């Protein structure tokens, strides 16, 4: 944990009228890691990112980037930012748009053409290079926007809901790309309400709820700190009875998988014995709780439950 920090947010606060969207948030992003900024919709994640990227100024607190608190202007070209909302020109051709974005980031046109082709091919939309953005699917629009954040070869990549609009195949593709970028030494701040997705990629997590940090740290250490009192079950049949078994304090069943939080001292073998004969068990594992379960245990509500749009985003 002695790795130098690319980003340090210290006690940042932002109000919109009487709403305190971000309420004293502090966290670090270590160089060469993927940090998940997590929380349900409306938690304050996007507002925090907008303060980090200089779109908003904090009402209180400081943001340090690359060791400086002088703001983003001096380091803007070292940062790639994917906003949650589409920030592209609908009438422009894809390739023209990307070259324009690269020019803004001080990239030479010859270099940006090479980089644009590389990323368009990597994200499997090279054949769409001459299409207008409005002619693309939402998933392909998201790919173009992601390329726009990566085109100038940034050191620090900030992504706000990068999987938005992507089908499962492309989610895996983008996940693979982000891991590759990390392996090259890039630093990534990934904001999402999808706990399971963050769990597959993040080294560190920052969990925000109601504009406050409720949990932060190394993901493996956070999970282990909650103990190994969780049973994960994969099965065939109707497992709806599993959360009501004796010794289970809380459980979620989705399709043919269940995650069950056990009472202190509960015997997992008794859970297994009670399930045998009622369902066909494919996997039964005692493990640390998932991020989803950790979130629910901390704030008492489903992590990925989307809420209506609010000021605190």
Image (cartoon, grey):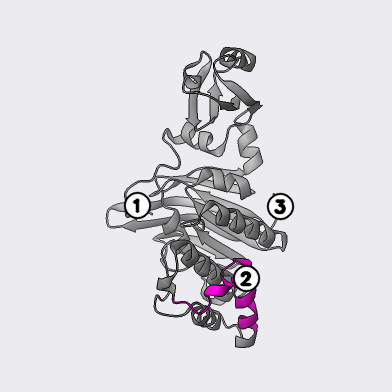
Q: Answer above or below: position of 113 versus 231.
A: below
Give the overall secondary structure of the magenta segment: helix
Q: Answer above or below: position of 111 versus 87.
A: below
Q: Residue 156 sits in which quadrant?
A: bottom right
Q: Answer above or below: position of 247 versus 94.
A: above
Where in the figure is residue 46, as x and y percent of width and height? 43, 57
Residue 24 visible somewhere in the drawing: yes
Q: Quadrant of the C terminus?
A: bottom left
- The numbered mark at residue 2 is 3
How far apart in space, not on screen, are marks 3 and 2 (Cα)? Answer: 37 Å
- Front residue of 67/173: it is 173
**Residue under circle 2?**
121
Where in the figure is residue 83, as x and y percent of width and height? 46, 64
Q: Which residues are magenta?
A: 111-132
Where in the figure is residue 19, as x and y percent of width and height? 30, 52
- Mark nearer the N terminus (1 vs 2): 1
**Residue under circle 1?**
20
Can residue 213 be found in the magenta stretch? no
Q: Residue at x 40, y 75 (%)?
A: 90
How far apart in space, not on screen, are marks 1 and 2 (Cα)? Answer: 43 Å
Can residue 121 be found in the magenta stretch? yes
Q: Residue 181 sits in which quadrant?
A: bottom right
Residue at disc 3, secondary structure = loop
- Mark nearer the N terminus (3 vs 2): 3
Residue at disc 2, secondary structure = helix
Residue 70 visible somewhere in the drawing: no
- Mark nearer the N terminus (1 vs 3): 3
- Front residue of 78/3: it is 78
How far apart in space, not on screen, are marks 1 and 3 (Cα)? Answer: 32 Å
């Amino acid at each position: 944990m002695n790795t130098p920090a690319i980003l340090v947010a210290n006690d940042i606060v932002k109000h919109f009228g009487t709403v305190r969207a971000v309420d004293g948030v502090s966290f670090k992003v270590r160089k060469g890691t993927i940090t998940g900024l997590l929380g349900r919709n409306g938690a304050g994640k996007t507002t925090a990112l907008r303060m980090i990227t200089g779109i908003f100024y904090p009402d209180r607190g400081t943001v340090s980037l690359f060791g400086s608190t002088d703001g983003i202007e001096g380091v803007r070209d070292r940062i790639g930012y994917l906003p949650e909302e589409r920030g592209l020109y609908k009438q422009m051709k894809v390739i023209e748009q990307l070259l324009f974005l690269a020019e803004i980031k001080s990239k030479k046109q010859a270099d940006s053409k090479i980089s644009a082709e590389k990323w368009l091919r990597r994200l499997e939309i090279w054949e769409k290079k001459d299409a207008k953005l409005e002619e693309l699917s939402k998933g392909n629009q998201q790919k173009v926007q992601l390329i726009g954040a990566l085109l100038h070869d940034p050191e620090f990549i900030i992504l706000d809901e990068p999987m938005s609009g992507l089908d499962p195949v492309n989610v895996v593709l983008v996940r693979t790309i982000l891991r590759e970028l990390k392996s090259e030494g890039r630093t990534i701040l990934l904001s999402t309400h999808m706990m399971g997705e963050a769990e597959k990629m993040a080294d560190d997590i920052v969990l925000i709820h109601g504009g406050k940090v409720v949990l932060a740290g190394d993901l493996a250490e956070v999970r282990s700190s909650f103990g190994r009192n969780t049973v994960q079950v994969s099965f065939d049949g109707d497992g709806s009875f599993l959360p009501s078994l004796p010794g289970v304090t809380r459980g979620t069943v989705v399709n043919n998988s269940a995650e069950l939080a056990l009472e202190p001292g509960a015997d997992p073998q008794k859970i297994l014995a009670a399930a045998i004969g009622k369902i066909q068990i494919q996997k039964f594992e005692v493990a640390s709780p998932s991020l989803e379960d950790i979130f629910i245990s901390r704030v008492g509500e489903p992590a990925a439950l989307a809420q209506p749009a609010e000021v605190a985003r």
